[in-house]
C-alpha cells in the first residue's frame, strides 16, 4: 500500500448531489425522530407557532420542528449557547439528517435561532415541553409518584460592573463620586482617589433592593458557586426518580433560597401531570438539606 499524502483542496466547479457525503445517521437521533413522527410533532408545533408569523409576507422562517430539534440537540449534547448549537449542527452530518436538512441545505445560524426564540412566547415552549411529556407517557416512561428536586445557579449575561442604583440611575463610579463629595468635599476626584476611597470605606455590600442591571433587570446579585458575586438566575428541576424524566423546569430570581421555591416547583410538576390528563400522583419528594425547614415540611 502506497503512502497517502494530504494535498491542498481545489474546489470542484460542478458536483452531483448523489456524490455529496451522506451520514448513516446516529441511532439515538434516528429513533428519536421516529418517536416524534408518531405524535405528529412537526404538525403540532407548526400549528402552535402559526399565530406568531405573517401569512404571506417575508421569506419563510426556520421550520418550528427544526428550531425545537436544535434545542433538543443543545440539551442532549450539553451545549449551553445558541452559537454552539448552530456550529454543532452545521458540523455534523448525522445531526443535519436529524434536522431534516438536504445535502445542499444550510443549517440555521445562531442569529436565526435568536430571532425565533424572541418571537415565540414562553407559553409555546411550555406547550412543546408538555407534548414531549405526553409522548413519554404514551411509551410508559412516566410515573410521577416520587420526584427529586434540585437547583443550580445560572450566570446572567450581564456584568456586575454595569449595575446602577435603582433610585438615581448612577453607575458605580458616579455613586462613589457622590459619596466622596458628601464625605470629603472632593468634587472632582481622580480615578486613583476613587479607588483609595472605595477600598477604605465600610458598608460596601450591594443589595438587590438598591442595585440592578439596566440590560437584565430580572437578574439578581447572587453568591456564585465559585464564591464570587455575580448576576444570576436560579434554575430548579423536578425529576421523576423512577424514569429520570424532567417534570418541571422552573427559573427563579437568583437570590431566592431553596426553601422559598420548593413548593412552587412541586406544584408545577403536579400541574404538568394534570394537564396531561393524569390523576394527581406525586406523594414523595426528595431534596438535599438545603431545602429543609419546618415551614417546608408543614406545607408539604
Image: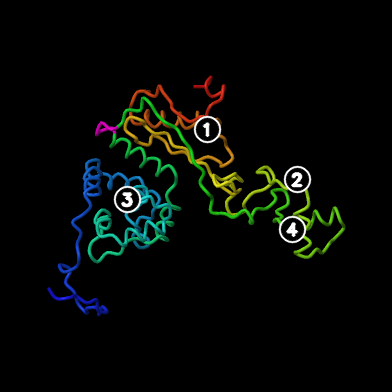
Between label 3 and label 2, give the one nearer the viewer.
2
Query: Where does the image place residue 38, in percent across and percent down from the top left?
Result: 22, 41
Residues at marks 1 and 2 touching, judged by CB atoms closer than 8 Å = no
Cα gap from disc 3 to disc 2, whole angstroms: 49 Å
Q: Earlier in the sequence, mark 1 or mark 4?
A: 4
Q: Does 255 sit above or below residue 64? A: above
Whether residues under marks 1 and 4 lie with C-beta atoms below 8 angstroms apart, the answer is no
Element type at mark 2: loop
The numbered mark at residue 203 is 2
Q: CA distance from mark 3 to mark 1?
A: 30 Å
Circles 3 and 2: CB atoms closer than 8 Å: no
Marker disc for residue 174: 4
Which residue is most to the top?
298
Q: Is residue 52 magenta?
A: no
Residue displayed at 65% across by 43% down: 208
Q: Are the residues flagged by discs 4 and 3 in contact, CB closer than 8 Å?
A: no
Tell whether 34 sits left or right of 257: left
Residue 54's spot in the image, x, y percent?
Answer: 38, 55
Q: Earlier in the sequence, mark 4 or mark 3?
A: 3
Main SS, magenta region, reads: loop
Disc 2 from disc 4: Cα separation: 17 Å
Q: Disc 2 vs disc 4: which is toward the camera? A: 2
N-terminal of the pair, mark 3 or mark 2, is 3
Residue in the foreground of this view, choosing between 7 and 83: 7
Mark 1 vs 2, N-terminal side: 2
| Drawn side of residue 59 relative to residue 32, left or right | right
Residue 175 in the image: above or below residue 263? below
Residue at figure coordinates x 53%, y 31% from the top left = 290
The mark found on residue 69 in the picture is 3
- Quadrant location of the N terminus? bottom left
Amino acid at each position: 500500500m502506497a503512502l497517502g499524502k494530504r494535498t491542498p483542496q481545489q474546489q470542484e466547479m460542478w458536483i452531483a448531489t448523489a456524490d455529496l457525503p451522506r451520514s448513516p445517521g446516529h441511532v439515538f437521533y434516528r429513533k428519536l425522530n421516529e418517536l416524534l413522527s408518531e405524535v405528529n410533532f412537526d404538525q403540532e408545533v407548526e400549528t402552535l407557532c402559526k399565530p406568531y408569523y405573517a401569512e404571506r409576507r417575508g421569506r419563510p422562517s426556520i421550520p418550528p420542528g427544526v428550531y425545537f430539534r436544535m434545542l433538543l440537540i443543545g440539551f442532549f449534547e450539553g451545549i449551553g449557547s445558541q452559537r454552539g448549537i448552530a456550529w454543532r449542527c452545521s458540523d455534523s452530518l448525522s445531526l443535519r439528517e436529524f434536522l431534516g436538512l438536504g445535502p445542499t441545505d444550510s443549517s440555521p445560524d445562531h442569529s436565526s435561532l435568536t430571532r425565533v426564540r424572541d418571537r415565540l412566547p414562553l407559553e409555546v415552549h411550555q406547550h412543546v415541553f408538555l407534548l414531549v411529556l405526553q409522548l413519554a407517557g404514551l411509551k410508559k416512561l412516566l410515573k410521577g409518584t416520587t420526584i427529586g428536586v434540585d437547583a443550580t445557579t445560572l450566570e446572567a449575561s450581564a456584568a456586575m460592573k454595569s449595575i446602577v442604583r435603582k433610585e438615581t440611575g448612577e453607575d458605580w463610579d458616579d455613586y462613589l463620586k457622590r459619596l466622596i463629595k458628601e464625605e470629603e468635599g472632593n468634587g472632582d476626584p481622580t480615578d486613583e482617589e476613587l479607588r483609595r476611597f472605595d477600598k477604605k470605606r465600610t458598608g460596601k455590600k450591594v443589595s438587590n433592593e438598591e442595585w440592578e442591571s439596566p440590560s437584565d433587570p430580572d437578574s439578581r446579585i447572587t453568591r456564585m458557586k465559585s464564591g464570587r458575586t455575580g448576576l444570576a438566575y436560579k434554575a430548579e428541576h423536578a425529576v421523576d426518580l423512577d424514569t429520570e424524566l424532567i417534570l418541571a423546569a422552573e427559573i427563579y430570581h437568583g437570590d431566592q433560597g431553596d426553601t422559598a421555591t420548593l413548593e412552587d416547583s412541586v406544584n408545577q410538576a403536579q400541574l404538568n401531570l394534570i394537564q396531561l390528563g393524569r390523576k394527581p400522583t406525586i406523594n414523595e419528594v426528595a431534596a438535599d438539606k438545603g431545602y429543609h425547614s419546618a415551614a417546608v415540611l408543614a406545607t408539604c
